Image: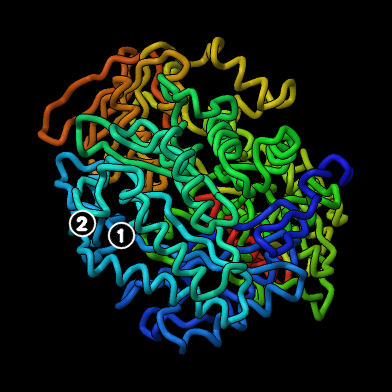
């Protein structure tokens, strides 16, 4: 690819009087890398990441803070002049690379964290749980008019400090379920005063007052991006496109120099326990496409680019640049700009995965972009108010610690295993100048990633991740011995200085009567069968064929194991017309363990239940018969669950056998990833990076 293929993304554009060198920006988000006990002051860890973003070629980077955030909650603050010097250091670091810096200002309002005990917030109105769009939030208190006036002033004062710190503009967050959106939306705003729901003007008043006050303090040329929900999809009395087009015009008239849109996607049900919302459109499409998709939601990409029709509608209504976010990428962005639908694309997760995306895109190096797999690890950590980290980018938040530095002593490094842990260890070691040799007994790199991609479908780009590593290791000159088993004799012959064992874990197969029967398909056998198909066809083709042809699995299936592996296997089978029962020796609370707690775990468990999956927990496995699986239930009842097929899908166990056989074969030996302690892809890549940087 050449940069001419992305010539529209490469064009400069202005937001107010601030010039962006290209059309790709990083939107504001909380990373929770601060220490609340120290007063929320800026730190070097945060600065290093934003410097990496600017160095990575972004046209604009946006940091984020809440000017009204007091007390022990995480988040960098800008509530006093004492915070200005830290933000000045941040702005200076960003400006080194011809990149403007904006600061997003937000107020969580009634949007309380789901996994962190915090006081109830304030909102336009106080809504009881039973009718709330988000009943898992602590019911918010209705904000008073004096408090609204204080909010307006504190937003404006924060923007004034931002300017003093050397930033170039403000992004005002009126989206999500935040305070400002609660005034705009009739679903959240039930008040009847001058900020009430009775007219567009009263609903927009607080936002317009903030916009005007920021301009008054910072000058009419101070650029402001207005971030807003273009829709509240599937929400009764939620924001509609007709309303938001009017709001966008009103915000432009009040001083907004650009409009950035997202959407809030609701799972509105009569069952209050199942009500939720997300601004991640791909999550809205999980685990399958909604039945009645709104005409304003683009559905072809299963969430990718879903907000584009909304952005296009807003663009027709205003005369300032329109920015679109929502799993956007460079190909969508280029076409959307060319077609006149948007002016700028805004990315977050993709830039957490690889801060250099813009630079690589404009240099035509798409194959070098670390792919975001949409796993939601980053957001899940943030919802727990834990430091945000990335599954595929172990350097996130550790940019200086993990800066690639040549090794002091060049070593011969042998890696056994071509899964995520082994590939990351090999990549980092090779970048640091070591001679790296990698063995994998399978014919292709990736470990279990290709198999997992067949089971998971399009929800996570695991094939893209495997391909990325294959390309990088080849470019770095790693000697790849695929289809070759690394025996102790072979390793002894090579005489490595460092031996890294990353051969993956062992399958856990229950030791019960009948487990070797013809109606049993163990996790090990399933992996082996799928991998054998890889010799003849691609994972994509296998996925396609499996929708109509799955000869090894009968119509009625019992899955032994109800954690991540079992639940995702059940999803795969249900989509292929099977009836599934899940049994687990653990408790009900352990069902789904390993799935991301925010959105993905509850969404999948609800979906499985809706599709007839029965969950039997705290059972004792008695054995397999020709009729099915015999168990003893937690109340002591013995029963046989009739099934054509029994599948084991249990968490892996450490690979101790291989480790023992390799003792003494190198001066340094490390066991990483599932071979040492089976966990998730996130943990495997982190383990590989740690060893790669340390040797």
Q: Which residue carries the number 1 mark? A: 109
Badge 2, how many Cα within 10 Å: few under 14, some, many 20+? Answer: many
Are the residues flagged by discs 1 and 2 in contact, CB closer than 8 Å?
yes
Check disc 2 and report the residue beneath it.
140
**Label 2: element kind:** loop
In the rendering, at what x and y percent does residue 254 appear? 49, 56
Residue 55 picture quarter: bottom right
- Please state which of residues 92 and 420 is positioned toward the viewer in this rendering: 92
Q: Quadrant of the C terminus?
A: bottom right
Q: Residue at x 88, y 55 (%)?
A: 477
Residue 232 appears in view: yes
Taking the image as shown, residue 261 lies to the left or right of residue 613, namely right
User: Label 1: how many residues lie within 10 Å, few (<14), some (14-19) or many (20+)?
Assistant: many
Residue 512, image quadrant: top left
Q: Nearer the viewer, residue 520 or 680?
A: 680
Residue 526: percent from left, percent from top: 53, 27
Q: Position of residue 46 (x, y in %)?
A: 56, 74
């Amino acid at each position: 690819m050449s940069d001419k293929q992305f010539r529209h993304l490469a064009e400069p554009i202005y937001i107010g009087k601030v010039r962006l060198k290209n059309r790709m920006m990083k939107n504001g988000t909380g990373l929770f890398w601060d220490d609340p006990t120290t007063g929320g002051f800026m730190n070097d860890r945060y600065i290093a990441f934003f410097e990496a973003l600017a160095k990575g070629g972004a046209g604009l980077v946006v940091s984020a803070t809440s000017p009204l955030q007091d007390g022990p909650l995480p988040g960098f603050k800008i509530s006093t002049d004492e915070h200005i010097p830290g933000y000045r250091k941040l702005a200076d670091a960003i400006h080194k690379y011809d990149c403007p810096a904006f600061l997003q200002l937000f107020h969580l309002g009634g949007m309380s964290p789901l996994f962190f005990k915090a006081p109830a917030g304030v909102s336009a109105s106080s809504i009881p749980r039973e009718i709330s769009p988000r009943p898992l939030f602590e019911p918010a208190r209705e904000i008073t008019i004096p408090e609204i006036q204080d909010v307006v002033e504190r937003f404006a004062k924060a923007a004034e400090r931002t300017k003093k710190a050397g930033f170039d503009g403000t992004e005002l967050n009126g989206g999500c379920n935040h305070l400002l959106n609660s005034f705009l939306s009739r679903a959240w705003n039930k008040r009847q005063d001058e900020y009430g729901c009775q007219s567009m003007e009263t609903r927009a008043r607080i936002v317009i007052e903030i916009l005007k006050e920021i301009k008054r303090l910072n000058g009419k040329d101070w650029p402001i991006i207005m971030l807003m929900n273009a829709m509240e999809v599937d929400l009764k009395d939620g924001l509609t496109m007709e309303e938001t087009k009017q709001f966008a015009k009103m915000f432009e008239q009040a001083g907004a120099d650009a409009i950035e849109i997202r959407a809030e996607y609701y799972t509105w049900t009569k069952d209050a326990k199942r009500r939720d919302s997300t601004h991640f459109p791909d999550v809205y499409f999980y685990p399958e496409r909604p039945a009645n998709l709104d005409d304003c939601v683009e559905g072809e990409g299963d969430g990718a680019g879903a907000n584009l029709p909304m952005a296009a509608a807003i663009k027709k209504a205003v005369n300032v640049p329109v920015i679109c976010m929502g799993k956007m990428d460079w190909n969508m962005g280029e076409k959307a700009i060319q077609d006149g639908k948007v002016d700028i694309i805004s990315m977050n997760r993709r830039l957490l995965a690889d801060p250099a995306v813009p630079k690589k895109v404009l240099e035509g190096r798409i194959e070098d972009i670390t792919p975001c797999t949409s796993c939601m690890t980053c957001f899940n950590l943030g919802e727990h108010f834990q430091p945000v980290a990335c599954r595929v980018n172990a350097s996130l938040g550790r940019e200086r610690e993990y800066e690639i530095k040549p090794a002091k002593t060049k070593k011969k490094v042998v890696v056994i295993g071509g899964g995520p842990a082994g590939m990351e260890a090999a990549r980092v070691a090779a970048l640091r100048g070591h001679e790296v040799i990698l063995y994998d007994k399978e014919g292709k790199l990736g470990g279990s990633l290709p198999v997992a991609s067949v089971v998971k479908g399009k929800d996570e780009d695991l094939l893209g991740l495997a391909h990325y590593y294959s390309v990088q290791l080849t470019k770095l000159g790693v000697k790849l011995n695929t289809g070759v088993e690394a025996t102790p004799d072979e390793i002894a012959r090579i005489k490595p200085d460092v031996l890294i064992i990353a051969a993956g874990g062992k399958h856990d197969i229950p030791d019960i009567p009948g487990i070797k029967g013809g109606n049993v398909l163990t996790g090990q056998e399933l992996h082996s069968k799928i991998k054998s198909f890889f010799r003849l066809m691609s994972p994509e083709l296998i996925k396609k064929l499996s929708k109509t042809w799955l000869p090894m699995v009968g119509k009625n299936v019992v899955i032994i194991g109800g954690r991540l592996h079992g639940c995702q296997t059940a999803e795969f089978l249900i989509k292929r017309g099977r009836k599934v029962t899940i049994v687990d020796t653990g408790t009900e609370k352990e069902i789904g363990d390993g799935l991301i707690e925010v959105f993905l775990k509850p969404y999948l468990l609800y979906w499985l239940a809706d599709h007839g999956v029965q969950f039997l927990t705290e059972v004792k496995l008695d054995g397999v018969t020709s009729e099915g699986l015999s168990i003893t239930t937690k109340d002591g009842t013995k029963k046989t669950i009739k099934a054509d097929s029994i599948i084991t899908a249990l968490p892996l166990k450490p690979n101790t056998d291989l480790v023992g056989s390799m003792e003494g074969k190198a001066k340094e030996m490390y066991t990483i990833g599932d071979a040492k302690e089976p966990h998730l892809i996130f943990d495997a890549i982190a383990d590989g990076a740690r060893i790669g940087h340390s040797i």
